[in-house]
Image (cartoon, rainbow, N blue to C red):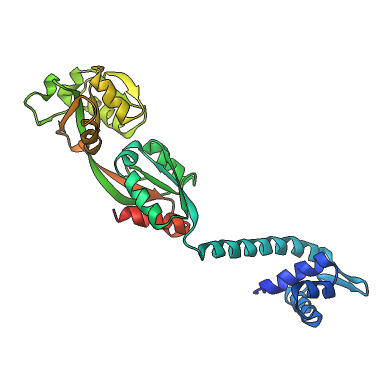
Amino acid sequence: MRLDPLSLRLFVSVVEQGSISAAATHGHIAPAAVSKRMSELEAQLRIPLLARTNKGAQATPAGLALMNLARRLVVDLDNIALQMRDWSGGTRGQVRVFANISAITQFLPREVAAFLARYPQVDVHLQERISSVIVKAVAENEADVGVCLMDGPADGVEVFPYHHDELVLMLPLGHRLAKGRRGIAFAPTLAHDFVGLHTGSSIMLLLTRAAMTAQRPLRVRIQVTSYDALARMVEAGLGIGVMPRAVAEALVKSVNVTFITLAEPWARRELSICVRAYDALPVAARLLVDSLRLQ
């Protein structure tokens, strides 16, 4: 059974206007055409929907039930028309993006800026979160798109490759670990205090696991929430730290620190894009994912 949206819209109008003739006038259609559609609707549903009198028409109990359902449908159809009208002037929409600090610091600023230059009527709401929170938020529809480090397979999300990065060891200028070295294993660094990122961050999880593997404690003297703050603390001699190479290369230009390569397989990482279901994404979110995947 297929119900005609126009017949449902006219039925709502008949009930609201109180008569077929009034609904016909309101809809700029002949009364006979409205009456015919009401009869066909009743025949299709096999139940009286209107009680017709010489004073007009009133909904029967079944008609009142249909009225509530049809009114919601009419509103939805009107909203669809409005949204499509907006789209006719260019792609519109809002995209909720959660990303970890590494993606926000290294890649997303220029890539989101390029996307918004192409789609200026799309709003991208970007928030920083740790990777474990991002995956959960995407799976629970709190965010449309997540950009993070995946710690193994995750249920409820689809995952796409994004960018690779490399972690390096950040040191104060003249630190003895940097003398004559281009790279260093992680175990010897555990003799020193660390400046760490916030608990639960991907880098802190990596360092904690690496310290456990080396069977030595990770001595975190202070924790901060940004790479810039980490570099400032390292500069002040409060410890050594770990951050992505691209971030370190930018910071050494303004902070009195240096960095060396971490000779560990886990220091080379792959960031990912995750979504609940790519095919079910709103158009604006799908366009953003496509744009990020092309980078």
Q: Is 233 above or below relative to 162?
A: above
Residue at 15 percent across and 22 percent down: it is: 188
Count numbered badges in the picture: 0
Q: Dividing the picture into quarters, in which one does residue 56 lie? A: bottom right
Q: Is residue 20 left or right of residue 6?
A: right
Residue at 32 percent across and 41 percent down: it is: 103
Residue 87 in the image, given as x and y percentages of width and height: 51, 63
Q: Is 13 above or below relative to 119?
A: below
Residue at 60 percent across and 65 percent down: it is: 81
Q: Is residue 161 left or right of residue 12?
A: left
Q: Is 234 above or below relative to 158?
A: above
Residue at 93 percent across and 75 percent down: it is: 54
Residue 61 in the image, given as x and y percentages of width and height: 83, 63
Q: Is residue 140 left or right of residue 14?
A: left
Q: Is residue 264 visible?
A: yes
Considering depth in this image, is 140 or 123 the residue closer to the camera? 123
Q: Dividing the picture into quarters, in which one does residue 24 lie? A: bottom right
Residue 258 in the image, given as x and y percentages of width and height: 17, 27
Q: Is residue 244 visible?
A: no
Q: Residue furthest left?
A: 180
Considering depth in this image, is 191 or 249 the residue closer to the camera? 249
Residue 58 in the image, given as x and y percentages of width and height: 86, 67
Q: Quadrant of the N terminus?
A: bottom right
